[in-house]
Image (tube, rainbow, N blue to C red):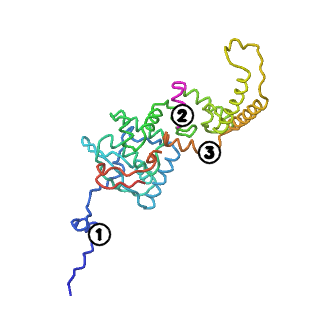
Amino acid sequence: MTNSTAPTIHRSFKAQASHSDQTGVKKDDVFKIPPHLLLEEPGFNERDYDDPRVVAKIEEFAQAYARGQFVPHLVVRIDAGTGKFYIVEGHQRTRGAMLAISRGTSVPFLVCIPFRGNDMDRVHCQMDSQDGLKLTPVGIARNYLKLVHMGATEEEIAKRRNKELSHVQAMLVLAEAPVEIQRMVNIDQVSATTAIEVLRERGDGALEFLRNKLKEEQAKGKTKIRPAAVREWTPPRKSAIAIYASVGSLVGSLKEEGFEGDPETLHGKTVSVDAHALYQLMQVFRLAEAQKGKRNKGSTSGEESAEEGAATDTASCSTSDSTDESKPQSPPSSWVSGLVSNT
C-alpha cells in the first residue's frame, strides 16, 4: 500500500496567512482607529447631510453599531505632515458611529484600511463605494468638476468612470449650474436631465425659466417640473406620419389646380381643393390637438419613467452606459492595501 499524508487543515486566518506558500492567503494590515480621530476633509465628500435619505442612512449605521452588528471597514488616509487621519470612504459610517456614541453606545474604534493613491484616486474611490447610498446627480457632477480642476480631461473621466463622454459633459453642465437649480434637483423639484436640458438651451435664463415652470406646476397641484412642461410639443410619430400623408394628398390636389408660381401673384385668389383630402387633414390635426391637450394636463407614467431613467445617466443624466454611476463598484487594488466592502 502507498502511504499518503492527509493535507494539513489551517483552521484560522492567521494560520492560513502563515502558510501562504500552501494556501495562497496573505495577511494585509488594517488599523483600529478611535472614531473621534477620523476627520472629514472640508469640501471632499459631496453629501448633502440635510438630505432625509442621508440622515436615515446615518441613523441606520448608528443602530447597527448599537446592536453590535458588523459594519464594513472604512478607507482612510494619513496626512504625513500632521499625522491626522482623513476619511476617504465611509463618512456616513463614521457619523453613524459618533451618533451611537452620543447615545451611550461604546464604539472604541473603527476598523480602517489604509488608502493608496493620489487626489484623483480619492475622488474616484468615493464615487465607487458611496456607502450603499448613491450620490445624487449633483454630487456626482461636483466630483467630476473636482477631477477637471485637478487636471483630468473629460475623456479621461469618462474612461475611468466607464461612462460615455456625453454623460460627463452633461454632468459638468449641472456642476456649474446656479446653486438654486442644484437645490431643485436635490429635492426632486426637477430631474437632472430636465435641468441640464434647460441650462443648455437657456443659459443664464435657465433659473428664472425653471422658477416660473415650477410655479405653474405647483398651481396644477404638482410638486415637480415635468419634462413635457419645458419642451415644445411635437406630435407622436404615428400622428406625424398621418399629418404628412394628408398634407401630401392636399398639396397634390393643389398642383392639379396649377397652384404654383410667384407667391406675390396669389393674393386674393381662390382655389378649389379635394374635400376628402381636406377632411383627412382636419381629422388628423384634431387628433394631434387632442394628444397635445392630454399631454399638457400631465405627463404619462411612461414619460415619467423614461425621464427618471435618463436622470441617472444624463445624470446619464443619463444616469446607462456600461455601468451605473450610482452603484457601488470595486476600486482598483492600488487604492487600498486590502479589500473594500461597499455598504
Residue 59 pos. (x, y %): 49, 52
Residue that numbered label 2 is attached to:
195
Q: Quadrant of the C terminus?
A: bottom left
Mark 1 and mark 2 residues within 8 Å of each other at the beta carbon: no
Q: Quadrant of residue 27?
A: bottom left
The stretch in magenta equals 193-205
Majority SS type along the magenta span: helix
270 or 199: which is nearer to us?
Answer: 270
Foreground label between 1 and 2: 2
User: Residue at position x 65%, y 36% from top?
Assistant: 241
Residue 330 pos. (x, y %): 37, 52
The kind of residue on which mark 1 rests is Ser
162 or 327: which is nearer to us?
Answer: 162
Residue that numbered label 3 is attached to:
302
Looking at the image, residue 30 sits to the left or right of residue 213; the answer is: left
Residue that numbered label 1 is attached to:
12
Q: Element at badge 2?
A: helix
Foreground label between 3 and 1: 3
N-terminal label among 3 and 1? 1
**Magenta stretch: includes residue 292:** no
N-terminal label among 2 and 3? 2
